[in-house]
Amino acid sequence: MMLPASPAPWRRRLLFLAALAGLFLAAWFFRAPLLTGFAKAWIVDDVPAKSDVIVILGGGVEYRPFTAARLYREGFAPKVLIMDVSLSPTEEAGLKPSERDLTRRILAHEGVPDTAVEAVGRSVKNTFDESVAVRDWAATNGTTRLLIVTELFHTRRVRWLFHKRFKGTPVEIRVVAAAPYKYQVTNWWQHEEGLINFQNEWIKLPYYWLKY
C-alpha cells in the first residue's frame, strides 16, 4: 500500500507562515478587547469599605488626590495620609511647591479639611519606603483597615508589598485604582504614558519580589 507523500518542505513553510500571519491579523483585529482584558487581569481594584484612613501614595498628583478626596467625601474614612516625598532640586530651591504641599492644596480644593490630612514618612523615595512609613503609622494609631489609592498598573505591586509589610498584623489592606486623566483601562496602549507605566510595572514587580 502506498502512503501519501508528505508535503514538500516549501509547502510546510508556506503553511506555517500563513498560520502565523493569520494569528497576527487576528491579534491586531481583536487588539482592543485583548489588551483591555490583559490590563483588567493585572489591575487590582478592591471595593472600598469603611476604613480608618485613606492613603495616597506618592506620584500621580494630577489624579490620585482627586480619587482619595472622593472617597473621603463619600465617608469611607475620616482621615487621609499623604507621603512626605523626597524633594526634587527645583522643590528644594523653592521654585515650585513640593508634592506634599501640592497634594494638600488639591485635597483642600476637593473638600478635605487640612485637619483631616497627615503627612507620613520622611523624604520617602519609593513604594517600599512608603509601605514602611504607613506600617509605622498604623502600628502607632491602632489601625484596622487601610484604603490605599494609587495608579492603575501600580496596584498589583502595592497589594503584594503592603500585604507582606502587614503580615501578622490585624490590618486589612484594600487597594483602590485611580485612573490617570491621560488614559483608561480601555485605551492604555494608545498613550505613551500608559505603555511606559505598564512596562515599568512588569519590570518592577519581579524586582520587588527578589529584593523585598
Image (cartoon, rainbow, N blue to C red):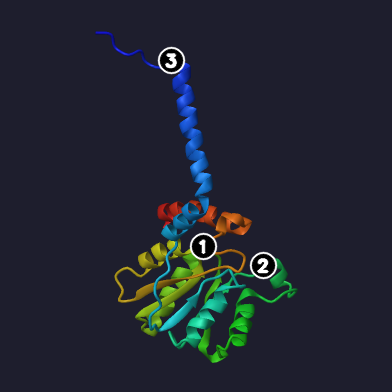
What residue sits right under mark 3 in the picture?
8
Task: Tell me which label, 3 or 2, sits earlier in the chain.
Answer: 3
Q: Which residue is mark 2?
A: 88
Residue 103: name its quadrant.
Answer: bottom right
Q: Is residue 119 visible?
A: no
Q: Which mark is residue 71?
A: none
Q: Give the residue drawn at x 37%, y 82%.
A: 143
**Tag 3: amino acid:** Ala
Q: How many marks?
A: 3
Task: Return the residue nearer the eye: 154 or 98.
Answer: 154
**Does label 1 or label 3 sit earlier along the sequence?**
3
Is disc 3 placed on a helix, strand or loop?
loop
Q: CA distance from mark 3 to mark 2?
A: 65 Å
Residue 22, placed above or below residue 157: above
Q: Which is in the foreground here, disc 2 or disc 1?
A: 1
Q: Residue at x 64, y 70 (%)?
A: 87
Q: Position of residue 97 (x, y in %)?
A: 69, 77
Q: Earlier in the sequence, mark 2 or mark 1?
A: 2
In the picture, the quarter occupied by the C terminus is bottom left
Residue under label 1: 185
Distance in Å between CA atoms under marks 1 and 3: 46 Å
Type of the residue with mark 2: Ser
Q: Residues within 10 Å of mark 3 (few under 14, many from 20)?
A: few
Circle 1 SS class: loop
Classed neighbour count for the residue bearing mark 2: other residues with Cα under 10 Å, few (<14), some (14–19), many (≥20): few
Q: Are marks 1 and 3 in contact (CB under 8 Å)?
A: no
Left/right of residue 93 with respect to residue 79 in the rendered view: right
Q: Is residue 6 above or below residue 178?
A: above
Which of labels 3 and 2 is toward the front? 3
111 vs 31, nearest the viewer: 31
The part of the image, by quadrant, that contains residue 188 is: bottom right
